[in-house]
Amino acid sequence: MEKSTMTLLSACSKGGTARVVKINATGPLKQRLLSFGLMKGSEVKMLECSPTKSTFEIKVGNVSLALRKEEAELIEVDDVR
């Protein structure tokens, strides 16, 4: 069985998809992410990222949301494709 490698959501490329492994945020930020459906096991698609990779637009289910780089770096993903 091939072991998948974990990476941060901020390292994903535009158009790529990944599965959330862990969210390292706490408090209100974690609650906000969970309320949008971003939780362990959910599939995320990278829609857009700024040229400097300081902001990211992702899609989780039917919800599109924007994340700052600092927020995207708190989300560990695998199965990146």
Image (cartoon, rainbow, N blue to C red):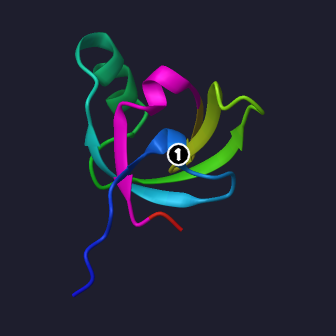
Instruction: Read off the residue under disc 1.
Output: 11
Q: Residue lying at the far bottom in this picture: please name it.
A: 1
Is 73 placed above or below 46 here? above
The quadrant in which residue 52 appears is top right
Q: Position of residue 38 (x, y in %)?
A: 38, 40
1 in the magenta segment: no
Query: Is 57 displayed left or right of 51 in the figure?
Result: left
Is 17 placed above or below 28 here? below
The quadrant in which residue 55 appears is top right
Assign the N terminus to one quadrant of the image: bottom left
The quadrant in which residue 81 appears is bottom right
Q: Position of residue 66 (x, y in %)?
A: 60, 28
Which segment did they paint magenta?
66-79
Front residue (pair 40, 51): 51
Residue at point 27%, 48% (across, down): 40
Residue at point 31%, 70% (across, down): 4
Residue at point 54%, 25% (across, down): 69
Q: The disc labelled 1 sits on which kind of residue?
A: Ala
Marks counted in the figure total: 1
Q: Position of residue 48 (x, y in %)?
A: 72, 41
Is 39 placed above or below 2 here? above
Q: Position of residue 17 (x, y in %)?
A: 54, 60
Q: Residue lying at the far right in this picture: please name it.
A: 51
Label 1 sits on a secondary structure element that is helix
Residue at point 38%, 21% (across, down): 32
